[in-house]
Amino acid sequence: MELHVENLGVARGGVPVLDRVSFTLAAGAALVLRGPNGVGKTTLLRTLAGLQPALSGLVRYPEGAAAYASHADGIKAQLSVTENLAFWAAVHGVALPETVFATFDLEDLRDRMAGTLSAGQKRRLGLARLGVIGRKVLFLDEPTVSLDTFSVRMFARWLREDHLGAGGIAVIATHIDLGMEAPELDLTPFRADPMARGGSDEAFL
Amino acid sequence: MIALLKRDLALAVRAGGGFGLGLAFFLIVITLVPFGVGPDTGLLGRIAPGIVWVAALLAALLSLDRIFALDHEDGSLPLLATSPLPLEGVALIKGLAHWITTGLPLTIVAPVLGFLLNLDTAAFPWLLASLALGTPALSMIGAFGAALTVGLRRGGLLMSLLVLPLYVPTLIFGALVVARGAEGFSTHMPLLMLAGITAGVFALMPFATAAALRINLR
């Protein structure tokens, strides 16, 4: 299994933001995306996850292998922590692994309503979803926002040992140091000329 | 898909979920009509089919924007879109969940309200039948409207303008079933038309809804 990206061009709101992005990740590899705000990290991740069409180029990975995690966690406030995770497990047709509660330090919070969790705890719950659904190719957009240093280390350990160690792939947009060895890709050189194309005809779609 | 239906129903009955909101609205609107029209029981009985159906339309409309807006706000929608569920299936389940929380309770209490409006007792079975057949279409068309306006803030008004004209065929044939039933005529034709509209809506709208969602997720 590998993630292959070739000459990818992506657009936000019809304006091209990145062009000619190419990289290949083998099983067990991670890539950290860097770049200033607005360079197109989120747009690139959404395009890779298939949420929006690419302007050009190609993205290849096994179908149904990708999972996307964004700033919003997709947590229902009126459901408990266990119910939230059980829902995603059922949607993905897998059993809810018991280990996930320990891995993401949610053991004491199992029956708490998600609405009463703190921002960091919600984030841990959001990330625990990735541990539940067992998708192999992860596209993570700022996964460590509002996590304390302990939780960041905990998440990095899960990513390194349980995900990448099991042959997973991860593309991560982050501004902080995750404490793991992964190649970095600075997106600044791939900036697209906003006037290049897309622009006008996109408005008619 | 069953998991999604279960979750949506669980969310609807828990705090702030809005279960019964449409039903309460339906009850209030219908109770208000006799106050506005006056105590002429003959007149009330004649306009009852139309009143019940218009009230059902408005009650369904009331909770439509919740169908996708809540999932959009908390980020569940892109996660559902990248899950193994087809987006068409998500749309269908969302419409179904809306019907179970709005259209179904409304159908069940409608005969009681028909009594309040002095509807001919001969029309009660037809009232039940027409609402049971017609309200699923209201929810499914509504899901389409909700998908079109999902990214917009305060998109509720625009959605009402988009959705209400699409409700016209259901309203016409739904009210016609009850009116004909009350007068003792055959309800065969309008009932078949109503069923046909609902069947057509359920065949086409999940695809239109999914397409609208895909565009709004970009």
Image (spheres, coloured by chain):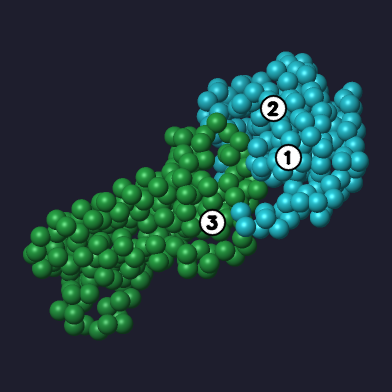
Q: Chain of mark 1?
A: A
Q: Amino acid at mark 3?
A: Leu
Viewer-side label of 1, 3: 1
Q: Is residue B213 left or right of residue B188?
A: right
Q: Position of residue A88 (x, y in %)?
A: 57, 33
**Chain B's colour?**
green
Q: Is residue B1 above or below residue B215?
A: above
Question: Residue beneath label 3, please?
Answer: B148
Q: Where on the picture, by quarter, is residue A110?
A: top right
Q: Chain of mark 3?
A: B
Q: Secondary structure at mark 3?
A: helix
Q: Is residue A50 above or below residue A154?
A: below
Q: Position of residue A81 (x, y in %)?
A: 62, 36
Question: Residue beneath label 2, please?
Answer: A60
Question: Residue beneath label 1, please?
Answer: A56
How far apart marks 1 and 3 lie (CA) works out to: 27 Å
- Chain drawn cyan, letter? A
Give the camera-side residue of A71 and B149: B149
Q: Residues within 10 Å of mark 3 (few under 14, many from 20)?
A: many
Viewer-side label of 3, 2: 2
Q: Position of residue A105 (x, y in %)?
A: 73, 29
Q: Chain of mark 2?
A: A
Q: Residues within 10 Å of mark 1 (few under 14, many from 20)?
A: some
Q: Residues within 10 Å of mark 2 (few under 14, many from 20)?
A: few
Q: Where on the picture, by quarter, is residue A1?
A: top right
Q: Amino acid at mark 1?
A: Ser
Q: Residue at x 31, y 72 (%)?
A: B31
Q: Is residue A2 left or right of residue B172?
A: right
Q: Position of residue B206 (x, y in %)?
A: 44, 46
